[in-house]
């Protein structure tokens, strides 16, 4: 999770951002990181338990605590709500502030730059026969020699 460490370093130098933005950013990294680590299996978020765990970890990791983690805990419920509303995470059930069977969406995977190769779209080249048919229809050519000549021109211009 190199992106997480880079993000954390950037957050430490972003003290000029409003508290809500900093808290949202840290909570979003926490949520997206947890979901990415478990992908494709969904996760449950018991929000109060997550908040307590984040705050305890912040205090335990240093004597003064890490303000970013405390902010992440504070803004976790609103961040989960926003990520759901904007289509970054899919929630099967939200009940009493808790979120059950939460999955990353393809949109979130794209933002993370981590779309699995199995679902990443690859540009498909058309078969030669399909290109010949399209050229013939487009040009309205009846003569095979003219078709071949135009096809060669078309293929040469497409490869340039």
Image: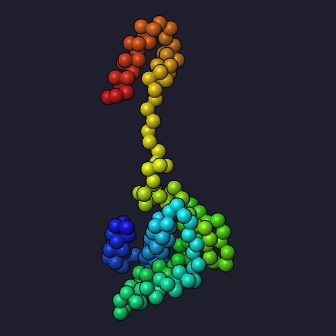
Identified at 33% across, 69% down, the residue is 6
Q: Quadrant of the C terminus?
A: top left
Horizontal side of residue 154 vs 87, given as left or right: left
Residue 79 vs 115, above or below: the answer is: below
Residue 67 vs 115, above or below: the answer is: below
* Camera-nearest residue between 137 and 3: 3
Q: Quadrant of the N terminus?
A: bottom left
Can the viewer see residue 86?
Answer: no
Horizontal side of residue 156 vs 123, given as left or right: left
- Residue 113, horizontal then vertical, whole percent: 41, 57
Identified at 43% across, 81% down, the residue is 69
- Residue 28, horizontal then vertical, whole percent: 48, 71
Residue 143 vs 47, above or below: the answer is: above
Q: How is the image coloured?
A: rainbow
- Residue 29, horizontal then vertical, whole percent: 44, 71
Can the viewer see residue 51?
Answer: yes
Residue found at the far bottom of this picture: 63
- Residue 66, horizontal then vertical, whole percent: 39, 85
* Camera-nearest residue between 40 and 125: 40
């Amino acid at each position: 999770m190199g992106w997480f460490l880079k993000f954390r370093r950037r957050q430490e130098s972003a003290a000029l951002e409003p508290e809500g933005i900093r808290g949202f950013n840290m909570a979003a990294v926490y949520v997206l990181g947890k979901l990415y680590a478990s992908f494709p299996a969904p996760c449950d978020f018991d929000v109060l338990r997550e908040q307590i765990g984040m705050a305890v970890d912040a205090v335990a990791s240093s004597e003064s605590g890490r303000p970013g983690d405390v902010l992440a805990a504070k803004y976790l419920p609103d961040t989960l709500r926003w990520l759901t509303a904007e289509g970054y995470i899919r929630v099967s059930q939200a009940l009493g502030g808790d979120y059950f069977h939460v999955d990353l969406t393809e949109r979130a995977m794209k933002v993370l730059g981590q779309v699995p190769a199995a679902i990443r779209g690859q540009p498909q080249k058309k078969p030669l026969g399909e290109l010949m048919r399209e050229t013939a229809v487009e040009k309205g050519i009846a003569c095979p020699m003219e078709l071949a000549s135009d096809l060669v021109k078309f293929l040469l211009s497409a490869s340039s």
